[in-house]
Amino acid sequence: MLIDTHAHLDMDKFSDDLGDVIKRSKDAGVGYIITIGADAASSVRAAYVAEKHEGIFFAPGVHPHDVRDMTESGYETIRELALSPKAVAVGETGLDYFYDLSPRDVQRKEFARQINLARELEKPLIIHSRDANKDTMDVMEAENAREAGGTLHCFSGDYEMAKRALDMGFFISVGGVLTFRKSDELRGIIKKIPIERILLETDCPYLAPQPKRGKRNEPAFLPYVAEVLAEVKGLSVDDIGRITGLNAMGLFGMAAPGAAPVVAYPIRNSLYLNITNRCTNACSFCVRSATDYVKGHNLRLPRDPEIPEILEAMKGFERYYEVVFCGYGEPFMRLDVILAVAAKVKEAGVRVRVNTNGHALLIHGREFLPKLTGLVDALSVSLNYPTESEYIEHCRPIIKGGAYDAMKEFVVAAKVYVPEVVVTVVDMPGVDVESCRRIAEDELGVPLRVRHYNEVG
């Protein structure tokens, strides 16, 4: 589901056909819209639109262009509106040094004031920043905006600004500008940002995406932004809708993101199987210690699923390029499941991959390896560190006694039975990737694949 996290549906440009605009948005797969206030009057209108229409929420705030006219009664109006059940944020607020329609000192003062309102009411912030990267972040840090959280909307800053915002727990929101032909720099920045920290928006009626340039923008055009973001991140449009939708629901609380745990879950053109949450490592960097979700899928299983449940969950797997055993645990802890399910997959002529920490020899001994012949096409084994001491410190194997060497032994032994074996390393700070590459290629005789830190799935 797509969520438009920033629209201006109260504006005159929508006064004649707002009902049709909302219907078109639903037909285009946009499940929720947040309509944004720019001053006290427009915030009142935004609240009215949200109250009249299902699936629309609002955020009251005062845009930096309009803070020059901010009054105490206007501020009280914003505060009162923010208490509404359909008010999901405070904003848009922030700084705009491009037009400078309000004095900069007034902009900073009122920005700080709205940050503190958001903190008081425990609402996230929707922040506008144009040509004011440093001052925006300085005010956010000085006023402890981290406590409220929120998003930098229609992001136009540099990567340094994005990094500072991410470090404060903020999201980055992108709209039609991402699709513009001359936005290569922005696309390069967005490529570096974890998809779990990105939101979608239109900022309609402004900034229509490339295929609609020059026309009035509207929420129904959001799929054009999703398509370009999918290209940038190497994901499918379905992935983008699911992940950014979950991001928005979690940040703005429009709906509980408590999706049921899944056994089979698609990412790109692969179908992943989450067959256990048990693991023989307790890695300090493992994402499962921080969240239940990977690429918008809840992987926190209440119990190990049985083979019939797995087969039921993966119905239609024939349309995928591959089926991958990989979830919130070590797949080889359930060897019987791998063998039985892989046999069904291979009968259909679909490729099988297993992502593993490489402890299978410690679990099952060497005798099981021939059973993989003809069933498993590829193994991806987590090497992670070039030395045993680092591996033990950070991967924290539960099986004591030689887990690191056993993992490397598994890689070498598996090559006899599995056509494609690679080892992986996460490019975290402090990890010597080149030493890992030498171990992979010179000692183990397999390629190294570098996985990006904070990018799971």
Image (cartoon, grey):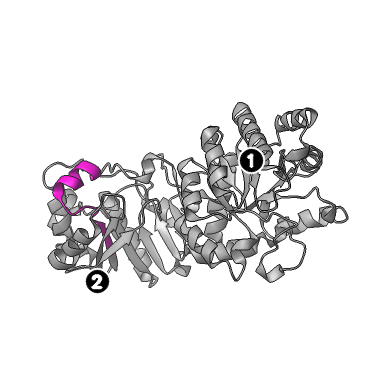
- The image shows residue 49 at horizontal and vertical percentages of 80, 43
Q: Residue 373 occupies which quadrant of the picture?
A: bottom left
Q: Of helix, strand and loop, which one carries label 1?
A: loop
Q: Is residue 124 visible?
A: yes
Magenta-drawn stretch contains 392: yes
Dot 1: within a 10 Å radius of its alpha carbon, few (fewer than 14), some, or many (20 or more) residues? some
For this rendering, which residue is in front, 105 or 131? Answer: 105
Q: Amino acid at mark 1?
A: Met
* In front: label 2 or label 1: 1
Report whether 439 appears left or right of 454. left
- The image shows residue 322 at horizontal and vertical percentages of 39, 67
- The image shows residue 195 at horizontal and vertical percentages of 49, 54
Question: Which residue corresponds to the image point at 58% horizontal and 50% vertical from the top-left?
Answer: 245
Location of residue 389 with respect to 381 vertically, above or below = above
Location of residue 89 with respect to 8 vertically, above or below = above
Report whether 341 appears left or right of 153. left
Kindly report the distance in space between the C-alpha atoms of the residues bearing marks 2 and 1: 47 Å
Question: Which residue corresponds to the image point at 63% horizontal and 38% vertical from the top-left?
Answer: 108
Q: How many marks?
A: 2
For this rendering, which residue is in front, 455 or 100? Answer: 100
| Residue bounds of the magenta highlight | 379-396
Residue assigned mark 2 = 419
For this rendering, which residue is in front, 332 or 137? Answer: 137
- The image shows residue 276 at horizontal and vertical percentages of 34, 47
Magenta-drawn stretch contains 139: no
Residue assigned mark 1 = 254
